[in-house]
Image: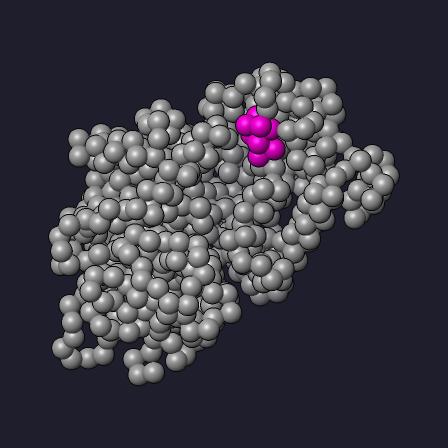
Amino acid sequence: MEGARESTGLPNPTTALVDTAGVGARPRRRATLVLTGPSVTTAVALRDGEVTVIGRAAPSDVILDERGLSRQHARVRWESGALRVEDLGSTNGTFIDEVRTRQGVVGPDDALRFSDVTATVALASSYDGAPAAPRSFQRFVDHEVERARALRRPVTLVALRAAEFTDDALALVASQLRPVDRIRSMGSRVALVAFPELSADSLPAWLGAAVDDHGWEAGVASFPGDAEDGDQLVTVALHALRSGGARPARREPQADGVVLVSPAMRELHEMIRRVARTTMPALILGETGVGKELTARALHDASPRAAQTFKALNCATITPTLTESVLFGHERGAFSGANQRAKGLFEQADGGTIFLDEVGELSARAQSALLRVLETKTLCRVGGSADIRVDVRVVAATHRDLESMVDEGTFREDLLYRLDALTLQVPPLRDRTEDILPLAHLFLRRSAEQWATSANDFAPAVLDALMVHDWPGNVRELKNVVERASALATSARVTLNELPARVRAPSPAERRSPAGPTPESSASLTERVEAFERTLIASALETSDGNQSEAARLLRVPRRTLAHKVKRYGLA
């Protein structure tokens, strides 16, 4: 189809505003369709009467590289103030308010998705000037508040206001959200963002940075505390926005606390104390979930830079073509959507420390740029030509074998030498069992303080189970298990019934069986199925080196489904 194109980015293929109209005079843009998939976010301009085909390959007008989409998945058309959708015989279906449909009309706030790609209609400011009532978004907030009430967890709503929320800005925010988060526009200037299971104090750092960098205004409201139901939560957030009230802070990561009981952890923190006074780069090694960011934070806090900025970035969460902009900043006009100059994390952390988690995921180009900063103490923003001096201590971390990556040609040897000036090895939890129970009590106490849960101790059988489990997810898995148990507990003590099946103390026979409980064991069918499913997911994650998109492909499930199960089983 003439005019078909792959979406171009901000500045990469993962975030784009696609205009499918041809050259010459064309109708005015009436709305924007924001498409958010597991790996791609795209904004599509909608004009009166124009037809747009969405799919995974040509000849679709808008092409998204998402495995759940068919080659030509669906056709959309904006007509008389509404979006008309027609499924083109796709394999995984088109859904309006979670009902699979062949043809239908989507209101400005109805829930629409193509397979696992969600779609949001945002009215253009030139359409009618009146913000649409976010009906499906309100239903989502109502549901999350009731869920939070039942599980004793928080949910936070952020209202954002800009001089004009452009399509690029809306898509850029959407691209940063977790699968469980939701964003809806209300006219041309205001957008609402819902963060299930996050309190106002734990909002992602990128949100506060975006508010500051773009000059947006923000209002924040949380349940419980600010509201009793979903309607009130929206009202309070909008009121906070109008009155210039609470806003997401440009927050730095906060340490969850460090337990120093085992000899291994005492030795590690003695090493931290000794090397903190230097400015040399440091490399932190350890399995996923052991607490590498906490170690980096402890190193910063013990150094002369403790009063300065600490910035953290998980390199695995940033698409390769965005990495340089995030790290080193960009000049106005450097790429589509770069409407103003922005400082990168290195400039923001000048005088302080920057923590690069999963540094092994950096692209070859980003590795070269990072090496230049380490060697020359200068950087150049994307689209710029001037060298900018920075004074930043770099602390990197990875769970991968960087030396093997050097041998394979996927990681620069000279960069490894630079980062490996000081090495800190964080031991897995199974090698420091003395820390398990003190950590469990710490997490239980914090859960009680944060969620007002009733449990303040563990039954003896639970302590035995915690000590027996091998904790493949390390401290992160332990924290998730304790928080879950705290939410489920109905008395002052956590019992075995509140623990996931995988953590309950196995019998010697079960420990010898790699397949988990036998049919003759006391475990229920559901528990045995869950144990088998967890084993399959863990194996796929190990095969894919922790890459959830690849693991989802191996297991032939949507990435979003896998992400929820990874969190459920404490494998993150």
Question: Which quadrant is home to the N terminus?
Answer: bottom left
Q: Residue at 35% x, 64% y: name it.
A: 104
Q: Which sits in the foreground, 418 or 523?
A: 523
Classify residue 247 as left or right of residue 177. left
- Which picture quadrant has residue 505? top right
Classify residue 7 as left or right of residue 320. left
Residue 552 forms part of the magenta stretch: no
Q: Residue at 32% x, 26% y: name it.
A: 226
> Residue 291 appears at what percent x and percent y?
56, 36
What is the magenta range? Answer: 480-488
Q: Is residue 367 visible?
A: no
- Which picture quadrant has residue 24? bottom left
> Residue 356 appears at what percent x and percent y?
47, 46
Residue 484 forms part of the magenta stretch: yes
> Residue 197 appears at what percent x and percent y?
45, 36
Q: Is residue 139 visible?
A: yes
Question: Which quadrant is home to the C terminus?
Answer: top right
